[in-house]
Image: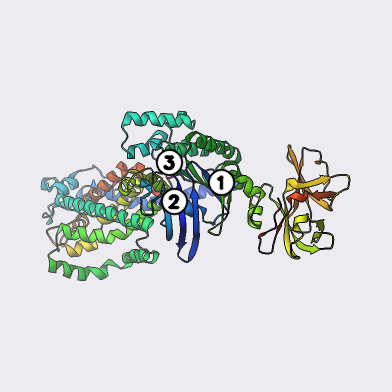
Amino acid sequence: MARIELCNLEKSFGAVKAVKDLSFTIEDGEFVVFVGPSGCGKTTTLRMIAGFEDPTSGEIRIDGRVVNDLEPRDRGLGMVFQSHALFPHKNVAQNIEFGLRMKNVPPEERVKRVREVAEMVRIGHLLEKMPSQCSGGESQRVALARTLVTNPSTFLLDEPLSSLDAKLRRELRAECDRLHQALKRTFIYVTHDQEEAMTLADRIVVMRLGEIVQIGSPMEIYSNPVNYFVADFFGSPSMNLVAGEIAQESSASRFRSARFEVALPEHFRTAKPGAVTLGIRPEHVIVTRDGNGDVELPVRLVEPLGKDTLLYFDTGTERAFIAVTEGLDMADIKVGERIALSLDQRRIYLFDDKGLRIGNAK
Amino acid sequence: MAMTKSHRRRVTTVVRYVVLSVWALIAFFPIYWIISTSFKLDTQWFAWPPYYFPSPPTLANYMNVWFGAEEYAQTQYAISSQKPLISLYNSTVIAVTSTFLSVLFGSMIAYGVSRYRILSEARMFQLLMLRMIPPIVVVAPLSLYYTAIGLIDTRFGLILVYFLTTLPYAVWMTKSFIDEVPLEVEQAAEILGASRWRTVFEIVLPLVCSGLVATFLFILILTWSEYLLALIITKTQVTTLPIELSKYQGSTEGRVYGRQAALAVGITVPLMIVGLIIRKHLARGFSFGMVRR
């Protein structure tokens, strides 16, 4: 059981405030992912929970008990590091066994439990090997096993998959998910990869510049971003964001940019005229080849991915305007061709000049 | 005529080997000459043309120098009061003890610097700067102090001064090895339940072991062959081997080359034996990077 509360947590390194007034509760058994660009304070937060960094101010409570002054080993947590941090002079079995030895578990019991967890993460065949003989993926499984064996109330995972290739990442991501389902423990996972966050989390905590920007389920974060930053950060390919302005006309409000003009849905009727950014996810851009659409844009690049085809349009800015179309029907479009697009009216987002969301697209 | 690329490469290789061979010859000749002289009869030490090989080889120099066996010497020399075996004992005790202390405390300070920043970068440089002071500057005042507090001509006195003068090396060298151990490896041990001491002994120490051994040998060579301090702050009670070596020049006999060579070989051999015993560690210690991130 572990319910972790962070109360007004702050951490400064000299003049730099790495974490600013962070308050958040992680429920028992929850899978929480801290996500954000590098330097946003997510790893510092995790390291404060682990006990490797002392908060400058604020409290950390585990199951109601303040643990600020507790040593890492007395907090009942397990941690998997980005670098795996295996002991290079001990073989895999000794690495996994280490935590049990520290807890004075008798030798026969140790052997049994090492074997069990090794089977659980499918590294039974590696027990006699040295860490230097293991591949990146294997090392990460060993690191996971080493943490699992001590049966911690909470798992802290600090970008555990970032050093692995894409295929292994997917594989181990599924493994983490499976372990969470099986163990029903609290998982706190730190990553800068929005895809990992989306696939793993019960709740995502989006951080930026030491502050929480948004907390919510993956779906909430994806479909209801509170600001430009969150909208831009989540989704792959990321949301189309076009700078322009709102013009209120008698019949409706319209969005205008250099190469782009669309009518806005009814709920933006009250929006103040002025500079805004229009956002729409690539899957909500409808491409038609019969010439009927809100706008017509020249194609900059065609990317056939097999299941989908990505079309990159030129809007006169560096950032391309992307549309996802199913299958390979559009793969034969030529670069430079002008194609008609329309935007799904219900899925249009607007952000003001401070990056905050305007209105509600629901 | 233009040279082909492979031809040019071959010529470069040949030139390189010739230069290196000549260099090796220059470097190793004195060592060879010492070994060779140590086996020569008295009459061959100064002979011209020189004897490149002792003929016949004799152990007389060794027996005479190390065991005071006068019957082996063809000529009687006035220097018969030497006690190289006692000096060997002194040198061993003093060099090994001071080196051990230096590496022990040096690595502890280095750990503190590496993990807890107990010394700032500026302080670390000041520590190294201590080594820049020429020993000749401090040796006279030191001998006055030592006389006053009764440390002159004692083993402890030499151990103390060797320990303190080699400490900066020990700190700097061991720190570079400790820095190589990723902090996360230690933190992993900690969160798995290991105490600070247990982490140091079970995780850090085995990982920096080779580095410590390399540091140990480096400092041992320094203390084993130190001359100036030993000359000034010891008198007759505690002589070390380098001091002993300097005594083989009689006022009437000139240099007693054969005896000196036999002593010199004896001084070098223990270091070589130590080097051989720990050679595995040395190769690893001096190549760094044994910890794979």
**Element class at badge 3:** loop
Tell me the number on the disc at residue B166. none
Seen at 46% across and 60% down, the residue is: A11
**Element class at badge 2:** helix
Tell me the number on the disc at residue A203. 1
Identify the residue under disc 2.
Answer: A49
Left or right, A164 with respect to A151, comes to right
Label located before the other in sequence (2 or 1): 2
Identify the residue under disc 3.
Answer: A1
Which of the chains bears the disc numbered 1? A
x%, y% of residue B67?
13, 46
Q: Is residue B18 visible?
A: yes
Q: In the figure, B128 relative to A91: above or below?
A: below
x%, y% of residue A214?
58, 54
x%, y% of residue A28?
47, 43
Give the quarter of the image for residue B239. Answer: bottom left
Left or right, A255 with respect to A219, comes to right
What whole-number distance in Å separates the C-alpha atoms at marks 2 and 1?
18 Å
What whole-number distance in Å separates the C-alpha atoms at marks 1 and 3?
18 Å
**Residue flagged by tag 3: what amino acid is it?**
Met
Check contact, mark 1 vs mark 3: CB within 8 A.
no
Crowding near the residue tagged with mark 3, few <14, some 14–19, many ≥20 C-alpha atoms within 10 Å = some
- Pointer 1 and pointer 3 on the same chain: yes
What whole-number distance in Å separates the C-alpha atoms at marks 2 and 3?
16 Å
**Residue flagged by tag 1: what amino acid is it?**
Arg
Check contact, mark 2 vs mark 3: CB within 8 A.
no
Left or right, A315 with respect to B154, comes to right
x%, y% of residue A22?
50, 57
Check contact, mark 2 vs mark 1: CB within 8 A.
no
Crowding near the residue tagged with mark 2, few <14, some 14–19, many ≥20 C-alpha atoms within 10 Å = many
Label located before the other in sequence (2 or 3): 3
